[in-house]
Image (cartoon, helix red, strand yellow):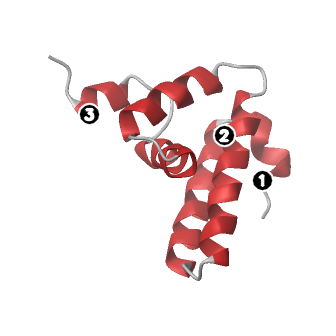
Amino acid sequence: MLTREDCLAFCDLTEDEIAAIAAHEHVPMLLAAEMGQYLIHLPDGATRIRRIILDDIAEAERHGRPAEARRLKAVLHHFAHNHPATRRTTAH
């Protein structure tokens, strides 16, 4: 039997990146991992995931959650580092 950790490990995204997708899409982590794995292999997938994280940052800022916004900015920075196609437009 596969554990939650096994399933997340099969994804080409970090747990924090998957969590950002889960929060944005209002779905459980395992479904977000599946969505993220699908998206990251699309030609514009990294850009779409970047947009999800940016949306999550904006949402945290709108609702007065600065610690969450800072954490998500770190997630975005890490994502951009691992997916160079998003680097040139990562500034927020």
- The percent position of residue 41, horizontal first and vertical second, equals 64, 19
- For this orientation, the residue located farthest to the left is 1
Secondary structure of the residue carrying tag 1 is loop
Q: Quadrant of residue 46?
A: top right
Mark number displayed over residue 5: 3
Q: Tags 3 and 2 in contact by the CB under 8 Å rule? A: no
Nearer-N-terminus badge (1/3): 3
Quadrant for the N terminus, please: top left
Q: Nearer the viewer, mark 1 or mark 3?
A: 3
Residue at mark 1: 90
The residue labelled by disc 2 is 49
Q: Residue at x 78, y 64 (%)?
A: 92
Q: Give the total number of marks visible in the rendering.
A: 3
* Residue 30 occupies quadrant: top left
Q: Which one is nearer the viewer's eye here, 47 or 85?
A: 47
Secondary structure of the residue carrying numbered label 2 = helix
Question: Identity of the amino acid at label 3?
Answer: Glu
Q: What residue type is labelled 2?
A: Ile
Give the percent coordinates (x, y) of residue 37: 53, 24
* Identity, as a three-letter code, of the amino acid under mark 1: Thr
Q: Is residue 7 left or right of residue 25?
A: left
The mark nearer the N terminus, 2 or 1, is 2
